[in-house]
Image (cartoon, helix red, strand yellow):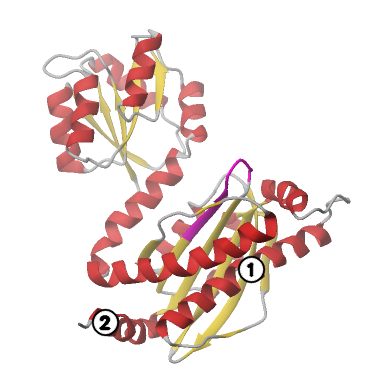
Amino acid sequence: MSTLVLICDDSKLARRQLARSLPEDWDIKVEFAEHGLDCIEKIKQCSPEILFLDLNMPHMDGYGVLQEIQSQDLNVLTVVVSGDIQPNAHQRVIELGAIDFIRKPCDAAKLAEIIEHHGIRDRAIRESLVHKLGEQLDPEIRDIYQELTNVAMGQAGDLLARLLNVFVELPIPNVNVLEVSELHMALQAIDASASTSGVCQGFIGGGVSGEALLLLNDSSFKEVASLMNYHGELNEKVELELLMDISNILIGSILTGLSRQLDMPFSQGHPVVLGQHCDVSELVKANKSRWQRTLAIEISYGIENHNINCDLMLLFTEDSLKTLKYKVEYLLED
């Protein structure tokens, strides 16, 4: 799936130079805008995931573009690329919603660093998937799935917060129907650049079945061990125990929370280790046969002031969709 990139600059030379500086291994389609008004029109027409924006342009400058993006609630990640290197310019564009500022002329290494630092590739993949799949679920049904998950993940977060004595950051869950290839991309987009360990646990009950998948970034283990008051050597055995402890808390509590709201008790299978210390792409490839078309609910947990990143995905089988839809439609009845 190509990422659509929009480059806005009144200089043809600058547009071409920036396009040539983008990473060669990045699957992208590039569009160009010659000034601010042209940029706003292109954003509305093409819905790019990423915008590289100059500041000094005719008709509408970059500040005006950022203001219009905010006022019109246009969904695009914006990186400003400009020769205006005043400190106030940098601060102003960040306040207007840009995610970063690159000084002209921009070399390929600096551009790659910015893209990597902000996870722009991964974020674009995920937002593109959400946009593409957004029409597959009725908005009211999606809203109910999200609210049910909000309640359940709150209970899971509370247990984790009490265990570790921390503040757990709870996100808005992503809910989508995914084909198998799209599920692979969604999993890889979680953190394609980091080593990851994963656990999967099946569940079934009342005509609904699926798997709960927990992915923990390997860089999180040291802080998890510290929060759980483990001060010995961190080896694979200890890390596996920590991974199982976290998965038991999060998977068990969120499935319990959902089953109570749906009045549908789930039986849980034994947890299965999908992989330790591997790239997400390797983990996905090794377990490709496990997942088909599915209703996927993704929850990304974070812990305030700690480098701990944990993603939980609930993957309901295609055969479960009819039963789930019946259950949530009942909740909509007056």
Which label sits on residue 141?
none
Q: Earlier in the sequence, mark 2 or mark 1?
A: 1
| Residue 304, image x, y percentages | 58, 44
Q: Quadrant of residue 34?
A: top left
Which label sits on residue 329?
2
Q: Residue at x 45, y 25 (%)?
A: 111
Is residue 137 found left or right of 278 in the rendered image?
left
- Label 2: state its secondary structure: helix
Is residue 55 found left or right of 185 in the rendered image?
left
| Residue 57, image x, y percentages | 19, 14
**Start and end of the magenta stretch?**
299-307
| Residue 180, image x, y percentages | 43, 69
Q: Amino acid at mark 1?
A: Ile
The span from disc 2 to disc 1 (Cα, nearest Å) is 29 Å
Indicate whether 82 appears above or below 219: above
Indicate whether 280 appears above or below 68: below
Is residue 13 found left or right of 105 in the rendered image?
left
Q: Residue at x 30, y 68 (%)?
A: 142
Indicate whether 56 appears above or below 93: above
Q: Which residue is mark 1?
A: 249
Indicate whether 310 appears above or below 19: below
| Residue 204, image x, y percentages | 52, 86
Please tell me how crowded label 2 is: few (under 14), some (14-19), or many (20+) other residues with Cα within 10 Å: few
Q: Is residue 284 visible?
A: no
